[in-house]
Image: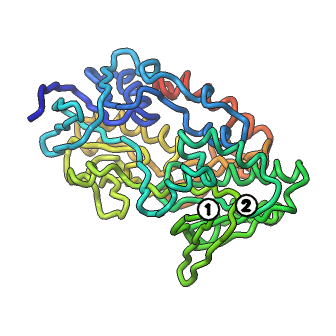
Amino acid sequence: MPDRTDHHGVLIIGGGNAGISLAAKLLRDGAEDVAVVESQSVHRYRPLLNYVGAGEATMASLERTADRVVPDGCTAIRDEVVSADPASLAVTTRSGRRLTCSALVVCPGLEEDWEATPGLREAYAAGWAGSTFDDTIAPDVWPALRDLRAGRVVFTVPPEPAPCGATALKPLFMACDHWRRSGVRADLEVVLVIPGPSPLGLRGPDGRLERTLTSYGVRVLRGSRVSRLSDRRVTVTGEDTVEDLDDVAYAHVVPHYRAPRWVVDSGLAGDTAAGLVDIDPLTLKHRRFRSVWSLGDVADVRTRPSGGALRKQVAVLSHNIAAGDDASLQHYDGYTVMPITTSRRRLMLVEVDRDGNPAPSVPGVDLTRPRRSTWLADRYALPQVYWRRILRGRV
């Protein structure tokens, strides 16, 4: 039995971007008694991990202690949720605490599905594979890529859901640019594995990405996934094909992702294979439990997860939690953004709605054209906006 019970007005599970920025916005909008449950003692601005993997940022530049980002007036609970009873609006933590609330927000993020790619963890441990999506491995990616002079290199884009999966193209393009400038690109065989027929499934941006892939001489395996790694061999499985890539010098393989097990076990998940929280993608309200809400990577919002998507979701959800009836609920339009570097100093910004239609934030400017200015904004300006405004509920 739980050792103690605490009650809060709004209980947020997850202290990442989604949880902290929502807590700050709720408090600014007048909510009382907001609590966030998070087990990690370090908070990371995760978009910079790709720059760590390209030698353009350090881990210290993207980390803060978790206590520093908790907004004033918010109760921080340093613990881990292990089970939930959404009908009773209660959760149990690893330390044995029982937490109840009037409104429950589920945003713990996704976790790696290691079982989906046998041998991946072992390849990480052996040092011949890694990923900028893993904060424990990201610092090792650039030293491995930087020093390559010949051989076969494999990159992957993960299937959805994934935390801004399209940005897995960033380390590929930044590494290719580095190798070309270093004069060794012709001695490397670079292979990209993507889950669909094109990088994004978006007609306009895909054209630019395909031209960039061609310019770097990247071989693309489409409609495929890495199904196994072993002894510097990467097995790639397509709809009707299986190909073994042997003698791999380095493999930047992003894991598949799924919701935490307790989300599924608690009945919060819908029918998605990854166990995403079953919400109305417009209102972010759970379809079966009236006072349960969700946002971020773990929520089934029917659009690609991203930090830009969260900014829209936070604004809608803060309003909707306080709304007195369903008729006054606001709707999230599915806006999301994919920042993709096409070289070490140029970046394209792809902004779309839930249906894949362009949703530019700057009218009259085609931000899908790679620019140095958008790279500067992504690398330097947005991190400052994140720490100083987004996590304080000001965006």
Q: Earlier in the sequence, mark 2 or mark 1?
A: 1
Instruction: Give neighbour class at mark 1: few <14, some 14-19, many 20+ (Cα, 10 Å).
Output: many
Name the residue type under label 1: Leu
**Residue for point 80% across, 42% down:** 345
Number of numbered markers: 2
Q: In percent of the image, x 23 and y 40: which residue is there?
A: 325
Q: CA distance from mark 2 to mark 1?
A: 9 Å
Helix, strand or loop at mark 2 = helix
The outermost residue toward the top is: 72
Q: Secondary structure at mark 1?
A: loop
Task: Specify whether 320 is left or right of 363.
Answer: left
Residue contact between numbered discs 2 and 1, judged by CB atoms under 8 Å: yes
- The residue indicated by pointer 1 is 200
Identity, as a three-letter code, of the amino acid under mark 2 = Leu
* Residue displayed at 39% across by 47% down: 331
Residue 158 placement (x, y as % from top left): 54, 59
Residue 241: numbered disc: none
Image quadrant of residue 87? top left
The N terminus: image quadrant: top left
